[in-house]
Amino acid sequence: MASDVTALPLEGRRILLGITGSIAAYKAAVLCRLLKCAGAEVRVVMTPLAKQFITPLTMATLSKNPILVEFFDPENGAWNSHVALGEWADCYLIAPATANTLAKMAAGVADNLLLTTYLSARCPVVVAPAMDLDMYAHEATQQNLRTLRSRGVEIIEPAEGELASGLRGKGRMSEPEQITAFVAELLDEKKKSLAGKRMIVTAGATIEAIDPVRFISNHSSGKMGYAIAGELAARGAEVTLITGRTALSTPRGVRRVDILSAAEMYAEAVRAYAEADGGVMCAAVADYTPAEVAQTKIRKHDGEMTLTLRRTQDIAAELGRQKGDRLLVGFALETDDEEAHAEEKLRRKNFDFIVLNSLRDAGAGFRGDTNKVTFIDRAGREELPLLSKREVARRIADKIETFLK
Ligand code: CTP
């Protein structure tokens, strides 16, 4: 058996290479060679148009496997199972990915084998876009890329340079060497720094029923908590995401538990934390819930109406009591005297560190894709610049790693 020192970067890895109809398809031959040289087993699926750009014979010879294009073999009727292909692969790499294929992936269109395989795949999916600069810059394409990214698809940005149209600009598929290095890095087990760790993350807003049609809730989108759950899972942690209702899709590799009310979140979080190494309390939990839920719709009447609310249980504080040597990370969303309030919560809820959002900072808080936070722990404070929520999630995961070591 090869030692770690001599092991090839993709030794034993199964790469499904998807090729779409772009002039950059000629680079797929080199890419296939490089993946094989790096130790990977490669199978190739092509769109019908891709065959016009590079022959199946070339790709079959290089990959040492028959090429898959149709749902079934026209010669003998054998079924090319997209489900089996998706299960086989450790990584589905679509290179080149045209604007058309990216749009279909974003919309969930399934009119060829390459796309049905994408919809079935549970492994990491990587795309290397290739197109003319104006197609790449078009808002439709950019929106599709954002959609795919938000669903966990890894995007290898195209490079600037001369394009097949003769124009110069951004749209040229990244070079096969870079794509191979990207995939090797993505699949590198040594990067799984949180392997064996069990984490729970609470996210999103809770919903407290008033009557069968009305409720009390808040503006939390859940984006920050989902980004953290995804990042921890990407680092190898076993993640349980206990979530209020959101419009977000489940990050790859994360076990998701859907709840509505603070009471439901409390029950699930206490149960999951008992088995966990740590928790990140990102949810915006209602502090009050109607004392009684009306069984029928409350009718309006003249004059004022009073609703009696009672306190919900504080999930973070309860986990803080049970914590022992587990890790507990909290969030604080403040509008005034921010750091003093956050420090008080750090102590009261027994957090190891707290992530402070100030609603006074532009670009921070609920709905956006950016956040500006300060970490506060018992040793001090660290103020981070305005970053994407994904980058903030990485920084939080880095800090979690230092505590779990
Ligand atoms: N939290 C929780 N359960 C609750 C309320 C809050 O788990 N019922 C968690 C949040 O997820 C967050 C932290 O506690 O990590 C701080 O939430 P916040 O609502 O700001 O704390 P409070 O102590 O309720 O603050 P305030 O006094 O400002 O209302």
Image (cartoon, helix red, strand yellow):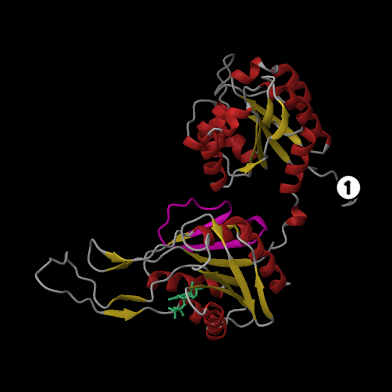
Task: Report the side of 230 relative to 287 (left or right).
Answer: right
Q: Secondary structure at mark 1?
A: loop
* Picture residue at 50% right of the left edge, 77% below the top: 316
Q: Is residue 254 magenta?
A: yes
Amino acid residing under circle 1:
Ala
Give the residues drawn in magenta, as a range.
234-256
Q: Do we see residue 98 in this rendering?
A: no
Q: Is residue 39 magenta?
A: no
Give the image location of residue 70, x and y in percent. 57, 21
* Picture residue at 37% right of the left edge, 78% below the top: 312
Q: Could you say which quadrant of the image residue 403 lies in?
A: bottom right
Task: Report the side of 339 relative to 2 (left or right).
Answer: left
Q: Could you say which quadrant of the image residue 10 lies in?
A: top right
Give the image location of residue 313, x and y in percent. 41, 79
Q: Do we see residue 360 in this rendering?
A: yes
Residue identifier under label 1: 2
Give the image location of residue 366, x and y in percent. 47, 61
